[in-house]
Amino acid sequence: MTAVINENPIIQVNNLKFFYPGDARALHGIDLSFPEKNVTALIGPSGCGKSTLLRCLNRMNDLIDGCRVEGEITLEGENIYGKNTDIIELRRRVGMVFQKSNPFPKSIYENVIYGLRIAGEKDKKLFDERVEKSLKAAALWDEVKDRLQESALGLSGGQMQRLCIARAIAVNPKVILMDEPCSALDPKSTARVEETIKDLRDDFTIIIVTHNMQQAARVSDHTAFLFEGNLIEYGLTDQLFVKPQVKQTEDYITGRFG
């Protein structure tokens, strides 16, 4: 499809192609832009390239030997695949929450400030302020404020995932990537995480991969449908789910395939 251009996007993807080792192509010339302080959902069947695309946005795919990227991704106008890119700084600006919650075997407090510590920050007052602010933003503060020095591994699955969200936002990123953040959670915990996502859209740009189309409809402002490494359709979520412009999108949304 033709390039999707939003006015003043925070991330712009131009003709992105991604190859796994052996030149197996996972993405075929993706053109897509992500508006600032919006939630964008990436949907599509398993293996369609949505998680690969997500991981291109903060170069997590660099960790896979033999992968190759062609095209351009800009963050606030700067090419993140430029030779002078500071990847640690990129991942501070573009944080990530994974499918399976991954708290460190440390206290709740230390989990939240981990990114600040590795950046060299030592200000205890700043730590305290950032812990409270981040846990409140992740809708977890009231549940853990009296147990900040306890191990994060003692939290429930849903609490762990919200802790990972708090850890991601503690370093004040511009963008938060979420790779199926609710797939391992029960319905009640999923609802809490979804409410957190809705609350965070005022301060952060969020890009979420989800296999749950109802979830995409509930939490996102825009939705992109991918199939076999191609961008099939992109638009406002309400419009795409109610009146898709491409029959393939309609077939997927209505369960005819996928």
Image (spheres, helix red, strand yellow):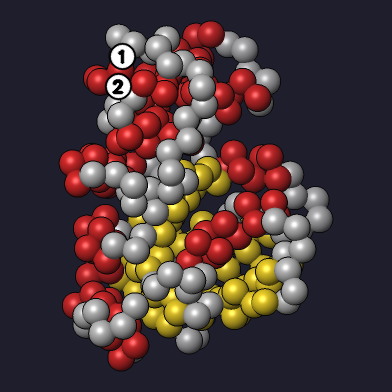
Q: CA distance from mark 1 to mark 2?
A: 5 Å
Q: Is residue 128 left or right of residue 146?
A: right
Q: Secondary structure at mark 1?
A: loop
Q: Residue furthest bottom?
A: 247
Q: Residue furthest right?
A: 83
Residue type at mark 2: give it.
Trp
State the quadrant of the C terminus: bottom left
Whether residue 33 is visible to the viewer of this picture, yes or no, is no
Q: Is residue 122 left or right of residue 81?
A: left
Residue 78 rendering spot, x and y as whole percentages: 67, 56
Question: Would you name the residue on which mark 1 appears?
Answer: 145
Residue 181 rendering spot, x and y as whole percentages: 38, 48
Instruction: Name the residue: 55% across, 46% down.
Output: 94
Instruction: Name the residue: 75% across, 74% down.
Output: 22
Q: Is residue 199 left or right of residue 50?
A: left
Name the mark on residue 154.
none
Residue 148 rendering spot, x and y as whole percentages: 38, 13
Instruction: Name the residue: 22% across, 70% down.
Output: 238
From the viewer's side, name the closer residue of 189 and 200: 189
Whether residue 233 is visible to the viewer of this picture, yes or no, is yes
Residue type at mark 1: give it.
Lys
- Asked which quadrant contains residue 207, the reply is bottom left
Question: Would you name the residue on which mark 2 appears?
Answer: 141
Query: Does residue 104 lie above or below 12 as drawn?
Result: above
- Asked which quadrant contains residue 138, the reply is top left
